[in-house]
Structure formats: structure tokens, C-alpha cells
Image (tube, rainbow, N blue to C red):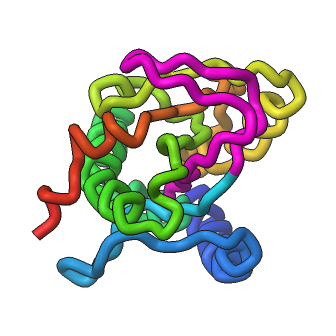
């Protein structure tokens, strides 16, 4: 029964996703190798939070330009349906993010505003192990925004886990400087 409810929810979400995509000014990154795009969609934004000091010495301040990264959640959740254990799901997400970051680097390198963009940023509750990918995990200072992101990510986490999830892990900013992104995932990695 739960599987049918999950499938129904994903179907509805899949129908609404093109509208969300159109309204949010997102762009896909990466080609369609093996018939499948990168897991990332991105958009340019001006950062509005507190000043962030990254581990590589980069400082991100209010009004700095960043490329906001979004996981393609509907696609990701559909693909996670084939896995039962949290370890398998975590490994799959890790590999999809790792495989998608070279495309994000390529997109940023060729972006018409590339010289002004200081790095990439995302907001997620899936922040365990992000440092191994090169991200700095930063606490969200604004309590309302943190609560809003936690509430908006909760349904997705519940569907992914096939059970009601407690809201225990707060979302965080995942941030990486442009220089670190190019160093780890530079355009030379895309064939």
C-alpha cells in the first residue's frame, strides 16, 4: 500500500515539476550521456545570508554572485526507489553528485557571468559526507529560513525513506568556491 501511495505522490510531483522548473529559472547542466542528464539544475543568484568563510580562504558576503545548485528531486526519488538500505541510497546520491559536479564546473566556467560568480551553493538535509566532495557545510543562521527549508525538505525525505521521518537533521548550506570547484572538477574532466 505504501509503495502505491509513494508512486502516486511521485507521479503528481512529476507532473508539477515542469511548472516548478519554468517558474524557478533553473537550467539543466550537462549533456545527455547514456540518455540521462546530470542530477543538477542551477540558477544564478545573489547571496543574501551572513558572511561565510570557506576552508580554502574564500569569503562569501551579501550580494556576492553564486550559482545555486538544485538536485533534480523527482528524478532522484524515482531512482532511489530501487534501493532499500540507507547505505545504498546514500552511496547512490553521493555518486550522482560526484558525477554531476564536473558538469556544474563546465557550466560555471562557460557562464556569461563567470568572472563575477564566486562559487556554488545549495541547501540540503543530505549533508553527511559532503566534505569528501569538497563542500563546506555551513549552518543556516536565519532561523525562519532554516525552519522553512526543513519543512519543505521533510516530504522528500519521508518519500525517500518509505517512512515518516523525524525532523532531526537541520538543513545546511553546502558551499564551494569557484576555484575549488575548478580544481576538483574542472572542465578538463568532461570529454
Going 23% across and 47% down the picture, which residue do you hit?
185
| Front residue of 182 and 43 | 182
| Front residue of 186 and 11 | 186
Identity of the residue furthest to the right in this view:
144
Residue 143: image x %, image y %? 85, 22
Quadrant position of the N terminus in the picture:
bottom right
Q: Give the range drawn in magenta.
A: 46-71
Compared across the picture, whether 163 is left or right of 107 comes to: right
Residue 141 versus residue 72 in the image, above or below: above
Residue 40 versus residue 140 in the image, above or below: below
Name which quarter of the figure residue 85 lies in: top left
Tell me, yes or no, whether the highlighted magenta stretch contains residue 53.
yes
Compared across the picture, whether 122 is left or right of 32 comes to: right
Going 46% across and 58% down the picture, which residue do you hit?
114
Tell me, yes or no, whether the highlighted magenta stretch contains residue 29.
no
| Front residue of 160 and 27 | 27
Going 32% across and 42% down the picture, which residue do you hit?
181
Residue 144: image x %, image y %? 89, 29
Name which quarter of the figure residue 91 lies in: top left
Compared across the picture, whether 191 is left or right of 153 comes to: left
Name which quarter of the figure residue 122 lies in: top right
Quadrant position of the C terminus in the picture:
bottom left
Residue 150: image x %, image y %? 74, 34
Compared across the picture, whether 87 is left or right of 45 comes to: left
Identity of the residue furthest to the front in this view:
115
Residue 107: image x %, image y %? 38, 65
Q: How many marks?
A: 0
Amino acid at each position: 500500500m505504501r509503495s502505491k501511495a509513494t508512486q502516486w505522490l511521485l507521479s503528481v510531483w512529476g507532473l508539477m515539476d515542469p511548472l516548478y522548473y519554468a517558474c524557478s529559472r533553473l537550467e539543466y547542466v550537462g549533456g545527455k550521456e547514456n540518455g540521462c542528464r546530470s542530477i543538477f539544475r542551477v540558477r544564478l543568484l545573489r547571496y543574501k545570508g551572513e558572511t561565510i568563510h570557506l576552508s580554502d580562504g574564500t569569503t562569501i558576503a551579501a550580494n556576492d554572485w553564486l550559482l545555486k545548485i538544485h538536485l533534480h528531486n523527482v528524478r532522484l526519488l524515482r531512482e532511489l526507489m530501487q534501493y532499500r538500505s540507507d547505505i545504498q541510497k546514500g552511496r547512490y546520491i553521493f555518486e550522482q553528485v560526484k558525477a554531476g559536479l564536473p558538469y556544474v564546473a563546465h557550466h560555471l566556467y562557460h557562464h556569461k557571468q563567470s568572472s563575477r560568480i564566486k562559487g556554488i551553493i545549495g541547501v540540503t538535509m543530505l549533508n553527511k559526507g559532503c566534505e569528501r566532495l569538497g563542500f563546506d557545510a555551513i549552518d543556516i543562521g536565519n532561523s525562519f529560513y532554516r525552519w522553512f527549508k526543513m519543512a519543505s525538505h521533510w516530504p522528500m525525505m519521508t518519500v525517500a525513506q518509505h517512512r515518516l521521518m523525524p525532523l532531526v537533521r537541520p538543513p545546511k548550506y553546502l558551499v564551494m568556491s569557484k576555484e575549488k570547484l575548478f580544481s576538483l572538477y574542472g572542465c578538463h574532466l568532461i570529454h
